[in-house]
């Protein structure tokens, strides 16, 4: 199908974009368009005004401030995937980005768009959940930061307010030598995942886990942290037995079934992928935490 | 009722398509695929699903693959687009086209323009480095083909992409 008619606006500065968003009624912001344009084509969305951010140059870019990797909302997923800075500071993120959609969609799709859309099966929110990322919002009134734990507001909905755009996502990076892994099960090898798991491990000199983060996507509207599984591993050596207990804990999370996967199957995947991710993260930490994908 | 924009509201668009500057007027809602096909008469770019899943409409935008059904023509203003019409040189097929033909990498041919654009980008990104079969299959995962079962196009891609540095890379 073809989109319903809309007024097209192409601001060249942030101020102009935010002004338009404040002044115009029934406006949607267009980033990479890899989720919004399908919705427009299918007429699931039919805004009167479309504000295209692609001409706003300073919304894209990747900077490291201390241990915080800040990625401008309009940064293409493919750019993040190939960025030397991202691969070095946050190999997990570069690796997970390589699983987003397909190369043809990653060339256009943006980091901010993915975080703003919050598809329940998307890869990027799972990484943001595990890393306690911060969503930086801007409006004509100013800037505010929302911790990722408070970002989701149900299915395809977020804490974003009227007149606000996602300006950047900030990822607090883990120390050098940490272990990481991203695991997912998809219906056909690529594309939408059914369940995906991110694991991050940091080990002390004595070989015990001093910090652990496990996030699981696909169980519900937004990714969740496997708190109980994290608690099992923290303070102990990440042996196979401890990892098995963490996997059991992950399988006890709540899951919603859908057309493709029953909730029991999703919880089974949560367990198996947690086991795989933790083993892989542990092995990477033992190897010095280096290496992309 | 919302005040719907008038259907006749059009914007002037200038795009370099296959190296030639082309102009036209289109509604902002006209996606690039329709602009190429209906306004410029370049019907080699095919439309399958029209919501970004099938990859038939893949073109190169400033050298990078993109779904032309997920981009509005107005967004391509001033950009450089390569379509399937721009990859062969006169009667000489692009090596990727020739290999697809040789290996029976197409049957009905509907998805083929998108497949060719994807493989052209892959060839450029590899810059002469060899590629494995799983990597070819991953690269082709964004292009749906319901005829071939992919084996022929995978064989074609492996032959061309692993031909080494002496293989001519076009465009």
Image (cartoon, coloured by chain):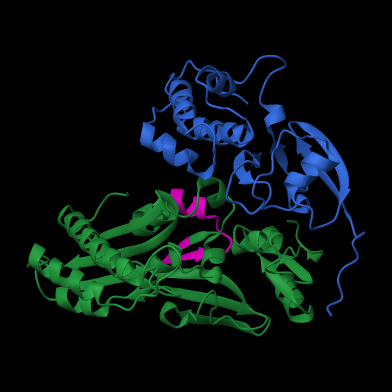
Looking at the rendering, which quadrant does residue B170 occupy? Answer: top right
* Foreground residue among A37 and A187: A187
Residue A69 within the magenta-colored segment of the rendering: yes
Residue B133 horizontal/vertical position (percent): 38, 32
For this view, does A179 lie left or right of residue B1?
left
Q: Quadrant of residue A161?
A: bottom right
Task: State the image coordinates of residue A143 (x, y, percent, origin top left).
Answer: 58, 81
Q: Quadrant of the C terminus of chain B?
A: top right
Report the residue at 41% width, 73% height from top.
Answer: A133
Q: Which chain is green in the rendering?
A: A
For the point 27% across and 61% down, the residue is: A273
In this view, A34 is above or below A138: above
Q: Evaluate whether residue A83 shows in this view.
A: no
Q: Residue at x 40, y 71 (%)?
A: A257
Instruction: Tell me the quadrant of the picture where the N terminus of chain B can be found.
Output: bottom right
The magenta segment: A63-83
Can you give x and y, in whole percent of width and height, for residue A19 in the image? 75, 77
Left or right: residue B25 versus residue A271 is: right
User: Which one is in front, A72 or A231?
Assistant: A231
**Which x, y percent locates residue A43?**
71, 65
Please name the color used to draw chain B. Answer: blue
Q: Is residue A11 left or right of residue A274?
A: right
Q: Nearer the viewer, residue A189 or A106?
A: A189
- At x 48%, y 23%, the residue is B156
Residue A181 highlighted magenta (yes or no): no
Q: Please indicate, yes or no, whether residue B139 appears anywhere in the rendered image.
A: yes
Q: Residue A96 versus residue A167: which sits nearer the camera?
A: A96
């Amino acid at each position: 199908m073809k989109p319903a008619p809309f007024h097209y606006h192409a601001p060249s500065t942030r101020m102009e974009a935010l002004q338009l968003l404040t002044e115009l009624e029934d406006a949607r912001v267009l980033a990479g368009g890899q989720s919004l344009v399908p919705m427009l084509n299918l007429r699931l969305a039919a805004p009167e005004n479309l504000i295209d951010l692609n001409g706003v140059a300073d919304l894209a870019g990747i900077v490291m401030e201390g241990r915080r990797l800040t990625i401008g909302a309009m940064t293409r997923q493919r750019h993040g995937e190939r960025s030397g800075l991202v691969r070095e500071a946050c190999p997990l993120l570069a690796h997970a980005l390589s699983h987003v959609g397909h190369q043809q969609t990653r060339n256009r799709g943006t980091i901010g768009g993915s975080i703003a859309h919050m598809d329940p099966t998307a890869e990027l929110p799972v990484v943001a959940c595990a890393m306690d990322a911060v969503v930086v919002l801007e409006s004509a009134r100013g800037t505010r930061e929302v911790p990722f734990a408070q970002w989701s507001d149900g299915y395809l909905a977020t804490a974003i307010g009227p007149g606000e755009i996602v300006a950047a996502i900030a990822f607090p990076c883990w120390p050098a030598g940490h272990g990481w892994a991203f695991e997912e099960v998809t219906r056909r090898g690529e594309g939408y995942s059914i369940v995906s798991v991110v694991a991050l491990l940091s080990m002390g000199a004595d070989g015990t886990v001093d910090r652990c983060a496990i996030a699981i996507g696909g169980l519900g509207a937004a990714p969740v942290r496997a708190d109980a599984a994290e608690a099992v591993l923290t303070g102990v050596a990440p042996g196979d037995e401890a990892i098995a207990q963490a996997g059991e804990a992950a399988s006890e999370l709540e899951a919603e079934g859908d057309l493709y996967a029953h909730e029991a199957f999703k919880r089974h995947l949560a367990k198996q992928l947690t086991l795989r991710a933790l083993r892989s993260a542990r092995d990477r930490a033992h190897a010095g935490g280096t290496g992309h994908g | 009722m919302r005040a719907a924009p008038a259907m006749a509201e059009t914007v002037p668009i200038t795009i370099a398509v296959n190296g030639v500057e082309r102009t036209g007027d289109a509604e902002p809602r006209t996606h690039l695929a329709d602009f190429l096909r209906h306004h410029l008469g370049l019907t080699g770019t095919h439309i399958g699903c029209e919501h970004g899943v099938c990859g038939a409409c893949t073109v190169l935008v400033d050298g990078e693959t993109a779904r032309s059904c997920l981009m509005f023509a107005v967004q391509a203003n001033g950009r450089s687009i390569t379509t399937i019409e721009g990859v062969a040189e006169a009667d000489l097929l692009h090596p990727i086209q020739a290999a697809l033909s040789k290996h029976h990498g197409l049957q009905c041919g509907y998805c083929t323009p998108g497949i060719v654009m994807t493989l052209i980008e892959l060839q450029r990104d590899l810059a002469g480095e060899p590629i494995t079969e799983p990597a070819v299959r991953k690269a082709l995962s964004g292009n749906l083909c319901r005829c071939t079962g992919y084996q022929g196009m995978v064989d074609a891609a492996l032959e061309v992409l692993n031909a080494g540095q002496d293989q001519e890379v076009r465009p």
